[in-house]
Image: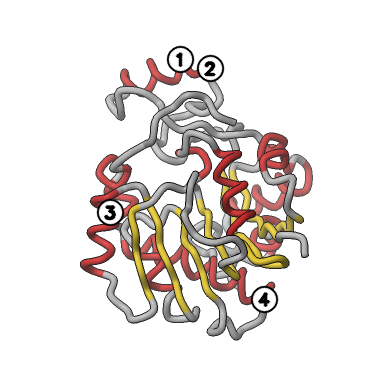
Amino acid sequence: MTDNRKYQLNFSQLLPQAMFDVCARRNKAQTMLQVMRDHLGSDLAHLGLLDIGSSTGIIADFLADHFREVIGIDIDAPAVAFAKQNCRKSNLFFTVGDSLNLGFPDNAFDVVICAQVYEHVPDADRMIKEIFRVLKPGAICYFAAGNRLALMEPHYRLPLLSVVPRPIAHLFIRLAGRSTHYHEHHLTYWGLKELVHAFEVIDYTRKIVAAPDFFHAGYMLREGSWKTILARRVVRAAYWLFPGYIWLLRKPR
């Protein structure tokens, strides 16, 4: 999966409207929590959690109210500094670190969060292997991932940006004035399945689309809206075209 990209440093400064949006980040955290409660049960207070790509710490701060211990790790030093200053709880810790070399012992965590991170790192395959290593046998990773075959690229809101060849994407993003080059590297549905092949994949995408209110996903899919109706049709007829996936990755025992 490596493609000679360098690390994407200071991502929170590139897209501050997303990384510092407390309401939006807490909405995502509520969905994460409900998915994990649906799978693991309502009592999560005995579990340790690692949030990879924790950025400004807003999601980790929310989850720390429900888990025994939460550690956030990110290579974005300014974001981690913000998290340390603004998200202070006795069971919550942040560190600047590399997702390709996590530095934690084998079998250390009950839960790992890896949400919209794989496309930013230089080697997604190595990151997934690190997640596998630090998870306990039978433990899970909450994995949220965008699909390369998306009509609208989620970070820069430019149509087909992730679909076109990279030289065209670089030119497109410069002409749009959004960045000097297109760093993100998304995978298709089949590429994502290959990426996580060592895990048992438990699909929550279909469950969330079927019951967005139950999973506190109204910020994405409002019950009765045309968007939700269309989403349900796409997951039934062409799942490989759905713009993003939420999976639980379970490490075999």
Residue drawn 58% across and 33% down?
Answer: 148
Residue drawn 49% across and 70% down?
Answer: 30
Around disc 4, counting alpha carbons within 10 Å, would you say few (fewer than 14), some (14 to 19), or many (20 or more)?
Answer: few
Residue 158: percent from left, percent from top: 42, 30
Callouts 1 and 2 close, C-beta under 8 Å = yes
Q: Which mark is residue 165?
A: 2
Mark pair 1, 3: CA separation: 30 Å
Disc 3 residue type (three-letter)? Ala
Residue 250: percent from left, percent from top: 71, 61
Between circles 1 and 3, the one closer to the viewer is 3
Secondary element at tag 1: helix
Q: Which mark is residue 79?
A: 3
Disc 2 residue type (three-letter)? Pro
Choose the circle earlier in sequence order: 4 or 3: 4
Is 103 in front, or is 218?
103
Residue drawn 25% across and 44% down?
Answer: 13
Residue drawn 40% across and 26% down?
Answer: 182
Q: Which mark is residue 183?
A: none
Q: Which image quadrant for residue 79?
A: bottom left
Is 63 in front, or is 165?
63
Mark pair 4, 3: CA separation: 30 Å
